[in-house]
Image (cartoon, rainbow, N blue to C red):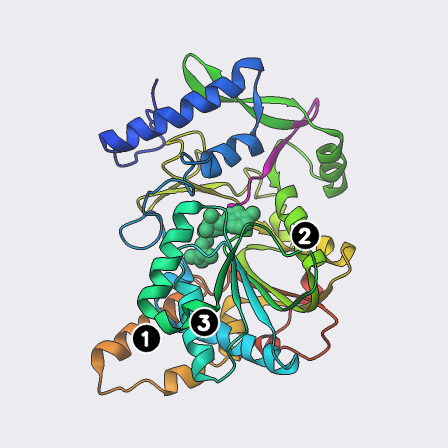
């Protein structure tokens, strides 16, 4: 069975024999689910990314960094983490202590660097919890923290699920929501359809079926016109509701790429926001390279804020990554760099540019802060707060 790769639109590097073999095992699993009919795209994406032992995030492939498929902010260096740590320090100080819970911790770089910076700031959390679906990534996180901050490892605990309730502190997630399986809808002349995946001539193919009542109702409310395809992330909304139940006092910081709703469902964005990454090649075909490539969708931050408010959280701030980092001590970190150490200074400058330039991550990435029983103004939103755009 082919890997759905002979589409001329996707000129991707060839996977090695081991990768192809791995992908075929996942394809067989998907095919067995399709024996009773097409599967909803969100289920396809869930299997592609998280099928135990086979999905992109569950299996042992190197995903992050230069030797992987894409680079995230914590993988660029420690500047992102050091700024986030300053925001965490303010909250831990306001709360007179507390814990941090990071969801979807990737390689563990953010956890290790936040802990080191909080140690410098003398504001360590009691515990640093990591909620991670992937067994492979848990191992990598343990290894990373043990390598960089071995003396702080005793504070780190891995969780299978959110604590039921009573969490005080900061719930943190960088590029988590974009990695959750989305439903894909298609507005057509003859109604609102939900995109499913089927097998045709031994290849995966899209097929549109009438949308579920929930998706139809949500899409109708968006008032979209013409032929329009996009996504709704019900899993991310459910995740926010679970986090809201856990959080008793403190904040949640969600960092991801995306837009407020009116920009997300802009008439010109009628092909949606699904993106795939394979060895630093970005393309838009999620049915290709099954289990070998990352699949993501941008985040509708208005929907996230609405889910939060519906769950009893307050929306404490919304801004660009650039504005958040600049308000969270980026200038102090820059000032602490030694220009005589040319290599370190250059590395710092490169990181800051990638994190903050509008043409890089500075504008597309946003920070949304949600809170419960927390009244203080957050330092990260002191330069700019765009809650009115949500
Ligand atoms: C795009 S990666 C981002 C990793 C990391 N935060 C970073 O910035 O490098 C998404 C991460 O979220 C994890 N993940 C996805 N869904 C999750 C869920 N429901 N709960 C916890 N982790 C999840 C994945 O296994 C992966 O570690």
> In the image, residue 327 lies at what x, y percent?
53, 79
Label 2 vs 1, first from the N-terminus: 2
11 vs 70: above or below: above
Is 327 part of what is drawn in magenta? no
Q: Dividing the image into 4 quarters, which one contains the C terminus?
A: bottom right
Q: Position of residue 335 (x, y in %)?
A: 38, 87
Q: Which residues are magenta?
A: 179-193
- For marks 2 and 3, the one nearer the N-term is 3
For label 3, being within 8 Å of ligand 1 is answered: no
For the N terminus, the quadrant is top left
Q: Residue at x 47, y 34 (%)?
A: 51
Quarter of the image where one finds residue 57: top left
Closer to the N terminus: mark 3 or mark 1? Answer: 3
Instruction: For label 1, count other residues whose C-alpha is less than 10 Å away and answer few (under 14), some (14-19) or many (20+).
Output: some
Residue bearing the label numbered 3: 114
Vertical placement of 235 versus 305: above or below? Answer: above
Is ligand 1 closer than 8 angstroms to the Cβ of mark 2?
A: no
Reading the image, the residue beneath label 1 is 348
Crowding at dot 3, Cα within 10 Å, few <14 / some 14-19 / many 20+, comes out as many
* C-alpha separation, residue under disc 3 versus residue under disc 1: 17 Å
Image coordinates of residue 275 in percent, x first then y, are 46, 42
**Residue 190 included in the magenta stretch of the image:** yes
Q: Which mark is residue 242?
A: 2
In the drawing, does residue 227 fall left or right of residue 348? right
Residue 4 visible in this rendered orientation of the protein: no
Give the camera-side residue of 186 and 79.
Answer: 79
Near-viewer residue (3 or 139): 139
Q: Residue furthest front?
A: 154
SS class, disc 3: helix
Measure the C-alpha gap from mark 2 to mark 1. Answer: 37 Å
């Amino acid at each position: 069975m082919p890997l759905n790769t002979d589409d001329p639109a996707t000129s991707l590097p060839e996977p090695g024999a081991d990768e192809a073999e791995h992908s075929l095992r996942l394809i067989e699993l998907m095919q067995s689910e399709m024996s009773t009919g097409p599967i909803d795209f969100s289920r396809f994406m869930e299997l592609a990314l998280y099928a135990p032992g086979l999905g992109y995030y569950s299996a042992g492939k190197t995903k992050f960094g230069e030797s992987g498929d894409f680079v995230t902010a914590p993988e660029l260096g420690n500047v992102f983490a050091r700024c986030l740590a300053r925001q965490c320090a303010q909250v831990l100080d306001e709360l007179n202590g507390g814990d941090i819970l990071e969801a979807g911790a990737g390689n563990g770089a953010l956890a290790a660097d936040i802990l080191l910076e909080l140690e410098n700031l003398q504001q360590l959390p009691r515990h640093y919890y990591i909620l991670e679906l992937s067994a492979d990534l848990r191992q990598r996180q343990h290894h990373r923290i043990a390598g960089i901050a071995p003396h702080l490892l005793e504070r780190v605990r891995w969780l299978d699920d959110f604590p039921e309730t009573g969490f005080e502190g900061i719930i943190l997630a960088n590029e988590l929501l974009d990695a959750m399986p989305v439903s894909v809808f298609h507005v057509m002349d003859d109604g609102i359809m939900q995109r499913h995946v089927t097998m045709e001539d031994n290849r995966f193919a899209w097929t549109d079926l009438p949308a579920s009542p929930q998706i139809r109702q949500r899409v109708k409310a968006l008032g979209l016109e013409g032929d329009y395809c996009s996504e709704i992330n019900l899993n991310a909304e459910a995740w926010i509701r679970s986090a809201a139940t856990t959080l008793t006092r403190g904040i949640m910081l969600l960092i991801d790429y995306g837009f407020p709703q009116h920009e997300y469902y802009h008439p010109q964005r009628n092909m949606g926001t699904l993106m795939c990454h394979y060895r630093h090649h970005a393309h838009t075909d999620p049915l290709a390279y099954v289990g070998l490539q990352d699949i993501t969708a941008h985040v509708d931050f208005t929907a996230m804020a609405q889910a939060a408010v519906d769950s009893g959280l307050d929306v404490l701030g919304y801004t660009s990554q650039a504005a958040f980092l600049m308000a969270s001590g980026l200038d102090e970190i820059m000032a602490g760099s030694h220009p005589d150490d040319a290599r370190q200074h250059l590395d710092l400058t490169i990181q800051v540019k990638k994190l903050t330039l509008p043409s890089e991550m500075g504008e597309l990435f946003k920070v949304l802060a949600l809170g419960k029983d927390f009244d203080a103004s957050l330092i990260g939103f002191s330069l700019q707060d765009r809650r009115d755009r949500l």
